[in-house]
Image (cartoon, rainbow, N blue to C red):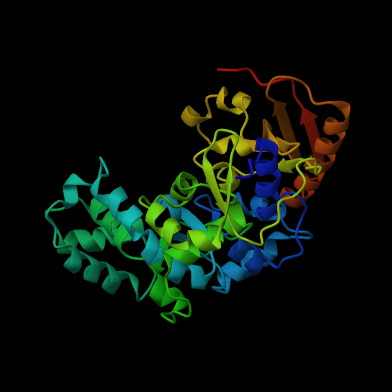
Amino acid sequence: MTQVLSRRALNRATLDRQLLLRRSELSVVDAVQHLVGLQAQTPHTWYIGLWSRLAGFVPEQAAELLTGRELVRIALMRSTIHLVTPDDARALRPLIQPVLDRDLYRNHTHGKPIEGIDMAKLIRDGVELLAPEPLTNKQLGTLLGRRWPDRAPTSLVYAIRNQVPLVQVPPRGVWGRSGPIAHTTADAWIGTDHTIAPSLERMILRYLAAFGPAGVKDMQMWSGLTKLREIVDRIRPGLKTFQDQYGQQLFDLPDAVLPDPDTPAPPRFLYDFDNVLLSHADRTRVITDEHGEQGYRTQRPVAQILLVDGFTAGDWTISRDNGSATITIRPYSRPFTTHDAVAVTEEAHALLAFTDADAETRNVVLDGPRQRV
């Protein structure tokens, strides 16, 4: 008889594999490798994702890896920018290319302007222009426009972004620094040494190691790919199978650990694009009904979420003024218990010490329940 995993059991398993049940002693590179990258289209918020997961993490650790080309930011899963190792940039990008193709050709802004274009020639032009040195989108668009005067430069740039593996280069993404978005080719930045061959089977196994147990729809949501059922069927003899509380089939690695559902889960501050919130079709293993009632899908900027007892319990913001940094935490529907309030406040002070180490004063405000929209 197939074992049924409760919502809480899935929650604790996912938090454990996401390094959120307890902070890990892994190195930054090993953690990013284990997590199959962090979504990182914003320049700096993903540093909080590493801080929430790694013991003793300081931002300079990741910043130095970026400038040293031991980590890169590149469009991958769901056609979004991810922070990954060079090996993963090489091994994952060919697998995710169908997602990027779909994003380009079905794009309501750029799809029509590139209809009928000689894509092979455009790709050659893009590589020729970007390989020697990084260019901003405006610079690349100007140069491409001279070669393709009958096409919209912004659409030409978007096509190159989707068809050519491009790395966003520092100082963009370096903690405490800023810079325009500029790209060069992945081959120019990290070389062409493919030490790990692309493999959908291996990608799925790695997804399970970081996000499992999970179903086929979950794998597809995380990656943006479709038709993964046949891939899972090929490796299914080597997987464990479960069911969730709704009867959906879940898969897992044979030696994966399932923590006790009653394992304590400390408060965790998630950043705006944290993959733990984005990488399952059924997100109830982490996301509560109250989270869904907040109208986040239509709100900008994207909310930053707080987990209490492993589940979404509120959101948070940091404001800065005259040398003071204040983190304001808003629970969803009811004030935190005394125990949770103490734990959340302690974690919030630690977060402020990380994000605003130079602030003269640091304050934590536990606000009233957030108003529903």
User: Measuring 52% from the left and 24% from the top, which residue is drawn there?
Assistant: 295
Q: Nearer the viewer, residue 12 or 303?
A: 12
258 sits left or right of 34 in the view:
right
User: Measuring 25% from the left and 40% from the top, which residue is drawn there?
Assistant: 108
Q: Nearer the viewer, residue 240 or 57?
A: 240
Q: Nearer the viewer, residue 274 or 238?
A: 238
Q: Is residue 88 above or below residue 23?
A: below
Name the spot of residue 278 as percent of width and height, x first.
Answer: 53, 43
Q: Is residue 186 above or below residue 175?
A: below
Count of number-bearing discs = 0
Name the spot of residue 292 as percent of width and height, x first.
Answer: 56, 26
Extreme residue in the front direction: 1
- The C terminus lies in which quarter of the figure? top right
165 sits left or right of 272 in the view:
left
- The answer to whether residue 293 shows anywhere in this view is yes
- The answer to whether residue 181 shows anywhere in this view is no
Q: Is residue 134 above or below residue 77?
A: below
User: Measuring 18% from the left and 52% from the top, which residue is drawn there?
Assistant: 114
- The N terminus lies in which quarter of the figure? top right
Name the spot of residue 243 as percent of width and height, x first.
Answer: 58, 42
Give the quadrant of residue 59: bottom right
Name the spot of residue 218 as percent of width and height, x first.
Answer: 49, 46
Give the quadrant of residue 141: bottom left
